């Protein structure tokens, strides 16, 4: 089975190469992209099944045994993330194909580069999830970031270039910090293999370990958009094309969170950053959601809720308890799905009404009732309205926080509750203005019929989000087991080095 | 029981289709869902009377302790009857209430049935978390119901208000539940209640938190304001909301918890104070209303306060009175609301100052209303009277509370009278009777049925009390069973006093009205809500303005400051090594100094070109450091990459102003300088600390052996790149591919006009025949240098051959795909620089995108091929084929991977030359002289400058309105800082 492990990276990359070669044949490009992502999804599901029942799968790239060569590790956490990200990227791809088909001849998205770049980004995402090596993780980040730079500025409008400047420069600085951290880690431990690093980091002095911990955390926190390092996000995401924003919002920040989860549990389990993380979680939640309340554009508003809810994920990690971590993992799955869905729905709003500016649109519930459902359900889901998965995730976090006790966890519990309410406040504002007001459309000529593929892809994601509620039992089971494995550290190390680390 | 919930869900899902098909008659089949709940409950009457529970449980998320656990005992059984029975009647009533062409009826029907299902869930749930789920669902559904006419602003506002107030309460309550559940280790109420609560200070807090939720749901003071506002909903919704659902959920929860928590410290004070205030304030406000619906709404508020006091008191008699009142209120309030709906629809208004003489025109409706209102006022032998007797009896021992409740009863009688008279009485002669339309039986029957039920159950007070006794017995034994015959003189006297007082108050309505007009509260909950939410919005905008300035330099400053803080903080704790290794080679120090100086000068440079070249110097110095450290391969790659970078930079600089723009940066200059120095210092210190701490040998020390034996190569660096860590190389070439296509897409996008796939844009060479120097016919003479062109043309093929040699020799000697590709790329670059864009096309007549794609294809394909032969991905093997003439070949498969790398690098350089070079040339030519493209050079004209300005990437890193949303602050000085400039 271990031959499956590299496929989620290799297949999209191979697809990207083919799509580039077939640049002049859009239909072939689409077929390749869809096939590549379908295969990726199928492989991811197999990996999750395998990792859940039979333990982590490890592949030694090129036959080079660890720690000499690079290993890819598909444990439950990685496999779960793979499944969700593959499903989401596939839906977004279909959505964007739907968009292409109906694009106005005037402002055609450059299909030629969209597909290869999108596939490369996917391979970067999957690479980051599977990486068992700190530098491979960096490469994964680089791949997805480079692709995201291109996707963000696609079309080259002035607005996008301007937003792209912020995004690219912050991205480069964060990569630089990550790279510095890798250099420092290698300098002090002499290895990049995560499993081998476990023992070697433990052997370092606690203070040096704290410093390494801090730099890595900083690098990941920028990518994950943790306050006060999150300001770049709402300035850049909303300008991109809808599917691009959607997939960025769903996946990219979560990879930062994934990296934080991985390093906090595997490399630095001493919990010395826990209090700091709790404070950051609290600030991220509140400052983020207040930002959302202050917005008058749907996409910007959603970008702020994105930042805000990163706080929940951080909260779960910072609690360092099994239930906290399990809830955080569940919440990642939920948030990837629902945030992507909302941005796709916002894209449909933009298409139907001509704008996402709340001052200029209204009455969509009457004009486009299906669109109303497609927005309302994920919006309620995001706001933590039961029985949706957002509620279940928040419930898990609340339970873990209350169990932890102590002043800081309690403060974050209060902040989390407040954030949940304010998210509802912000999303109902959108609902009230864009959907319930008397109709007004910026572009009254806009075709009443939305492209079927776009609506279909959004619907699938909405249903996927609702499905998380139905499947919450097994999903929480996997999250809990993944969290236990992470906290024990041994399963990971033993998977890479069955005979113990050298 | 789960089937009942599922039935509601299915009915809700089908509702739009049914309404689409049958119009408003679809409400009849939909009524089956709540009716079946009613019937189901009747079937279990005996079980409940015997004090047994009906239980069902299904797992959901065991890790969270949340399961679909349902349990029916006396209290919940009673509520199932109310929720189901009244739900069904209201749905029947809807058939005639709505006009046939009412818009949004399908949605309304679906949401209403869903609402009924959610309410049923609240009362069935045994798991507290499941109860919360259904609880919140009722909030959401009522939100959708209240805004039935969403295009009216008041409607939307009321809906939002109701949702937010109840959700806030709900969340607070959830925290309380979680505290209970985590302490008890279970969320099943039956289990929590069965065991004594674990002691601890948490209990008081948890109970108060839960009460906040329950009371806000039931519109108890100080959250009463949302309920009257919710009158924006259609009347059937109001009837259901007030009589059986939503607001009753809070009362239900208080009643559910009271047997266990009534003795907990804060319970009674909270219940009594808020309850009594609500009773009095609600009743007082009801007396003032002219809208019949609002009158009833404030009446509901008052009665809810009463119910909460009763069920929260924690004594058996009060509890018995409470459940009796619960039933009584549900029956008469539902009936009255339905009557108001009839009046509203058939007489066209519900303003009691306008209505006149309806008792003549709709006598049956009037009779129904009188019967229900009499029950509300507590006239014997109606159920309302029975309940009131029980209340007065239960609180006989508590005079202050009794007095307050009596006052409440006075108010109730008064507003009941006001209701009946206002709705139905005739007016003095000049006023005509209000014209009405006929009232259908279907419309009246539900209301009449409910009113009559109040009479029947009043007469049957004894059996009713017996049936419901299971609940009050949880508190102890009942002293006074229910009866419609006055039990004691004192109670009867008090009851009569309430009636007389109420009628008196009503008779004195003119002076009372005058008092009310003067006695207005300084503010009400609604205003407070508005002020709070507006202030909160302002706060949010101000805070976001402060944190989200839209200024890239600020964002970077924060990041770097965090870096200094993290590293500096950790370093201060002193992870210093015992010894610090110093390089023995003095040349390294010299190079280091040069590097440092170049870096400082780069930052200070005012001219862009200077800055680029100085930055290049730092790169070259790094390469020299590699050489001195004995890494020729790295040095070679670094030299070449640096050179290509400079070429690219120069190409870009053609379109930028020559100097960095001067902006008002002086102010923050020293801060930025200090930050830069600090970052450098901490990173350096950290590098020293980290290197000094290493004890274990690095993994790379073991590379050389296996590189030869397993990777079949002597050049360890190359084997590392294409074999040991080929996975990372694969990722990095993907980065190159993406970067190249991205740059190209931006440049080629620039062009306006009809859309064409950009790769088709290779310009047709002017002149069909191949010429040796393409620059001849295509380039401006003043730009040409014939010697340069000829030399380049002569050595080009040699260099390309050399690059291929580097590629193939790389496995054992310095070189490799990356270096080879850079060399070939440089050859192309020089060719372009010498001969212009047409010369470039001639030198490389291929599509760069194709080259990139093929390169990636070859590299990744090599990896996949290894898998298909059974090895790990990217595993290399040694091929030793016998070729004719050549003899035995020694071929490592990783060379194919390296070929892919080579192609990607060449493609990258070519793509950049095409876009940043050739395409920009073309654009400049077009701008200079549309049409010919062949003119002498001249200084940048206005058109060119304008274009340069628009295309310059040093546009402000963030701007005001766009990047900061509603924030107007950010238009301040900071946003003027340029992205590019700010970094330097």
Image (cartoon, coloured by chain):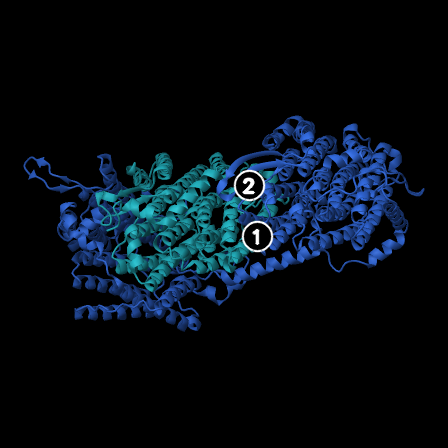
Chain colours: A cyan, B blue
**Could you tell me which secondary element the residue under label 2 belongs to?**
loop
Numbered disc in front, either 2 or 1: 2
Coordinates of residue A29 in the picture (x, y in percent)? 35, 37
Question: Quarter-wise, where is residue B124 in the image?
Answer: top right
Q: Tell me the quadrant of the picture where the N terminus of chain B can be found.
A: top right
Coordinates of residue A203 in the picture (x, y in percent)? 29, 59
| Residue at left offset 16%, top offset 58% | B632
* Pick the front one: B847 or B388: B388
Question: Quarter-wise, where is residue B365 in the image?
Answer: top right
* Pick the front one: A301 or B315: B315
Q: Tell me the quadrant of the picture where the C terminus of chain B can be found.
A: bottom left
Residue at mark 2 shares a chain with residue at mark 1? yes
The residue wearing badge 2 is A387
**Could you tell me which secondary element the residue under label 1 belongs to?**
helix
Can residue B476 be seen here? yes
Coordinates of residue B747 in the picture (x, y in percent)? 35, 51
Number of marks drawn: 2
**Chain holding disc 1:** A
* Pick the front one: A129 or B780: A129
The residue wearing badge 1 is A422
Coordinates of residue A176 in the picture (x, y in percent)? 33, 59
* Pick the front one: B499 or A188: B499
Q: Is residue A317 depicted above or below A367 in this figure?
A: below
| Residue at left offset 44%, top offset 55% | A318
């Amino acid at each position: 089975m271990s031959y499956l492990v590299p496929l989620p990276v290799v297949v999209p990359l191979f697809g990207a190469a083919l799509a580039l070669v077939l640049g002049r044949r859009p239909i072939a490009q689409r077929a390749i992209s869809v096939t590549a992502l379908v295969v990726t999804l199928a492989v991811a599901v197999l990996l999750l099944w395998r990792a859940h029942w039979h333990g982590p799968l490890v592949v030694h790239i090129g036959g080079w045994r660890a720690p000499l060569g690079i290993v890819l590790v598909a444990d439950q956490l990685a496999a779960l993330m793979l499944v969700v990200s593959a499903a989401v990227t596939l839906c977004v791809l279909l959505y964007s194909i739907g968009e292409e088909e109906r694009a106005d001849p005037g402002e055609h998205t450059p299909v030629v580069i969209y597909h290869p770049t999108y596939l490369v980004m996917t391979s970067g995402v999957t690479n980051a999830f599977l990486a068992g090596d700190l530098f491979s993780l960096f490469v994964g980040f680089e791949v997805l970031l480079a692709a995201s730079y291109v996707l963000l500025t696609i079309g080259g409008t002035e607005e996008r270039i301007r937003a792209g400047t912020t995004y690219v420069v912050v991205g480069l600085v964060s990569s630089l910090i990550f790279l510095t951290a890798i250099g420092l880690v290698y300098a002090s431990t002499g290895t990049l293999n995560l499993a081998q690093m476990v023992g070697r980091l433990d052997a370092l002095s606690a203070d040096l370990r704290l410093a390494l911990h801090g730099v890595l955390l900083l690098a990941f926190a920028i990518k994950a958009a943790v306050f006060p390092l999150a300001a770049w996000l709402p300035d850049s995401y909303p300008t991109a094309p809808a599917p691009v924003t959607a997939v960025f919002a769903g996946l990219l920040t979560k990879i930062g969170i994934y990296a934080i989860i991985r390093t906090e549990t595997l490399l630095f389990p001493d919990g010395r950053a826990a209090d700091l993380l709790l404070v950051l979680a609290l600030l991220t939640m509140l400052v983020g959601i207040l930002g959302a309340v202050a917005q008058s554009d749907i996409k910007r508003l959603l970008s702020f809720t994105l930042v805000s809810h990163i706080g929940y994920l951080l909260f779960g990690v910072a609690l360092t308890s099994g239930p906290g971590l399990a809830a955080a993992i569940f919440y990642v799955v939920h948030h990837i799905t629902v945030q992507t869905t909302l941005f796709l729905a916002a894209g449909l709003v933009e298409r139907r009404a001509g704008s996402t500016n709340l001052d200029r649109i209204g009455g969509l519930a009457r004009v486009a009732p299906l669109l109303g459902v497609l927005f309302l359900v994920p919006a309620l889901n995001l706001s933590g309205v039961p029985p949706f998965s957002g509620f279940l995730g928040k419930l898990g976090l609340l339970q873990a926080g209350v169990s932890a006790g102590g002043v800081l966890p309690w403060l974050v519990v209060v902040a989390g509750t407040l954030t949940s309410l304010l998210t509802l406040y912000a999303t109902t504002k959108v609902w009230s203005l864009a959907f319930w007001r008397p109709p007004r459309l910026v572009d009254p000529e806009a075709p009443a019929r939305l492209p079927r593929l776009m609506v279909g892809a959004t619907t699938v994601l909405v249903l996927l989000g609702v499905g998380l509620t139905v499947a919450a039992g097994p999903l929480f089971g996997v999250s809990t087991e993944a969290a236990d494995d992470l906290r024990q550290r041994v399963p990971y190390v033993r998977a890479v080095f069955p005979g113990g680390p050298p | 029981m789960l089937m009942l919930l599922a039935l509601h869900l299915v009915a809700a899902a089908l509702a739009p289709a049914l309404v689409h098909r049958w119009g408003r008659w679809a409400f009849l089949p939909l009524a089956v869902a709540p009716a079946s709940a009613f019937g189901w409950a009747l079937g279990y009457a005996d079980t409940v009377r015997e004090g047994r529970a009906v239980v069902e449980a299904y797992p959901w998320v065991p890790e969270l302790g949340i399961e679909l656990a349902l349990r029916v005992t006396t209290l919940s059984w009673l509520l199932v009857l109310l929720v189901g029975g009244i739900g069904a009647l209201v749905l029947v009533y809807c058939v005639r209430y709505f006009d046939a062409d009412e818009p949004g009826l399908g949605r309304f029907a679906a949401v209403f049935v869903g609402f009924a299902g959610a309410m049923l869930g609240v009362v069935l749930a045994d798991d507290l978390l499941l109860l919360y789920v259904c609880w919140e669902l009722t909030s959401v559904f009522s939100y959708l119901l209240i805004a039935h006419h969403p295009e009216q602003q008041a409607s939307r506002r009321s809906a939002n208000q109701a949702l937010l107030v109840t959700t806030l309460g709900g969340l607070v309550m959830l925290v309380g539940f979680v505290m209970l559940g985590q302490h008890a280790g279970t969320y099943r109420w039956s289990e929590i209640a069965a065991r004594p609560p674990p002691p601890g200070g948490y209990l008081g807090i948890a109970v108060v938190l839960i009460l906040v939720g329950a009371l806000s749901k039931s519109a108890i003071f100080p959250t009463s304001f949302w309920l009257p506002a919710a009158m924006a909903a259609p009347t059937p919704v109001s009837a259901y909301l007030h009589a059986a659902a939503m607001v009753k959920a809070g009362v239900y929860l208080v009643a559910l918890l009271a047997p266990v928590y009534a003795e907990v410290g804060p319970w009674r004070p909270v219940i009594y104070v808020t309850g009594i205030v609500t009773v009095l304030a609600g009743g007082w406000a009801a007396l003032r209303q002219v809208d019949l619906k609002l009158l009833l709404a404030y009446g509901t508020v008052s009665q809810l306060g009463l119910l909460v006091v009763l069920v929260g008191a924690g004594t058996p008699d009060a509890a018995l009175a409470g459940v009796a009142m619960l039933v009584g209120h549900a029956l008469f309030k539902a009936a009255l609301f339905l009557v108001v709906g009839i009046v509203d629809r058939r007489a066209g208004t519900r303003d009691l100052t306008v209505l006149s003489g309806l008792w003549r025109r709709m006598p049956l409706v009037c009779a129904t209303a009188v019967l229900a209102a009499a029950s509300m006022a507590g006239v014997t032998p109606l159920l309302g009277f029975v309940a009131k007797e029980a209340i007065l009896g239960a609180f006989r021992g508590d005079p202050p509370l009794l007095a307050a409740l009596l006052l409440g009863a006075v108010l109730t009688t008064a507003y009941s009278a006001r209701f009946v008279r206002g709705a139905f009485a005739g007016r003095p002669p000049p006023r005509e009777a209000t014209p009405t339309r006929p009232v259908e039986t279907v419309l009246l029957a539900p209301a009449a049925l409910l009113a009559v039920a109040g009479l029947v159950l009043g007469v049957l007070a004894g059996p009713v009390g017996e049936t419901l006794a299971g609940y009050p017995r949880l508190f102890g034994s009942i002293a006074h069973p229910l009866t419609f015959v006055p039990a004691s003189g004192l109670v009867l006297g008090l009851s009569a006093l309430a009636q007389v007082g109420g009628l008196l108050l009503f008779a004195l309505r003119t002076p009372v009205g005058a008092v009310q007009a003067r006695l207005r509260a300084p503010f009400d909950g609604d205003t407070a809500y508005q002020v709070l939410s507006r202030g909160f919005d302002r706060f949010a905008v101000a805070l976001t303005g402060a944190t989200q300035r839209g200024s890239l330099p600020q964002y970077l400053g924060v990041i770097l400051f965090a870096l200094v803080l993290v590293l500096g903080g950790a370093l201060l704790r002193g992870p210093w090594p015992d010894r610090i290794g110093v390089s023995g080679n003095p040349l390294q120090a010299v190079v280091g100094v040069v590097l440092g100086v170049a870096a400082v000068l780069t930052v200070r440079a005012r001219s862009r070109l200077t800055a680029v070249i100085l930055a290049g110097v730092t790169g070259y110095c790094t390469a020299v450091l590699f050489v001195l450290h004995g890494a020729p391969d790295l040095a070679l790659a670094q030299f070449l990459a640096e050179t290509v970078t400079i070429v690219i930079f120069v190409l870009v600089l053609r379109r930028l102003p020559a100097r960095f723009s001067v902006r008002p940066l002086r102010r923050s200059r020293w801060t930025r300088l200090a930050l830069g120095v600090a970052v450098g210092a901490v990173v350096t210190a950290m590098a020293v600390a980290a290197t000094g701490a290493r004890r274990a040998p690095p993994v790379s020390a073991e590379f050389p052996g296996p590189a030869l034996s397993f990777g079949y190569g002597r050049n360890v660096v190359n084997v590392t790149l294409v074999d040991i860590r080929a996975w990372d190389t694969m990722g990095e070439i993907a980065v190159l591919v993406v970067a190249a296509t991205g740059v190209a897409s931006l440049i080629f996008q620039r062009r306006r006009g009809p859309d064409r796939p950009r790769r088709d844009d290779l310009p047709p060479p002017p002149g069909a025949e191949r010429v040796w120097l393409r620059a001849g016919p295509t380039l401006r003479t003043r730009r040409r240098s014939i010697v340069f062109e000829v030399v380049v043309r002569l050595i080009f093929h040699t260099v390309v051959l050399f690059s291929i040699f580097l590629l193939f020799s790389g496995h054992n000697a310095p070189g490799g795909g990356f270096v080879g590709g850079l060399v070939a790329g440089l050859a192309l670059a020089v060719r372009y620089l010498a001969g212009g864009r047409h010369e470039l096309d001639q030198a490389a007549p291929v599509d760069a995108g194709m080259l990139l794609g093929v390169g990636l294809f070859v590299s990744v394909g090599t990896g996949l091929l290894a898998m298909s032969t059974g090895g790990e991905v990217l595993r290399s093997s040694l091929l030793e084929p016998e070729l004719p003439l050549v003899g035995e070949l020694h071929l490592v498969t990783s060379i194919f991977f390296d070929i892919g790398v080579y192609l990607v690098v060449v493609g990258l350089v070519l793509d950049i030359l095409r876009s940043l070079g050739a395409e920009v040339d073309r654009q400049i030519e077009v701008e200079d002289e549309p049409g010919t493209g062949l003119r002498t050079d001249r200084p940048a004209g206005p058109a060119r400058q304008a274009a340069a300005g628009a295309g310059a990437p040093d546009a402000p890193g963030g701007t005001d309105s766009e990047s900061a949303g509603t924030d107007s602050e950010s238009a301040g000085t900071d946003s003027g800082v340029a992205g590019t400039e700010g970094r330097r």
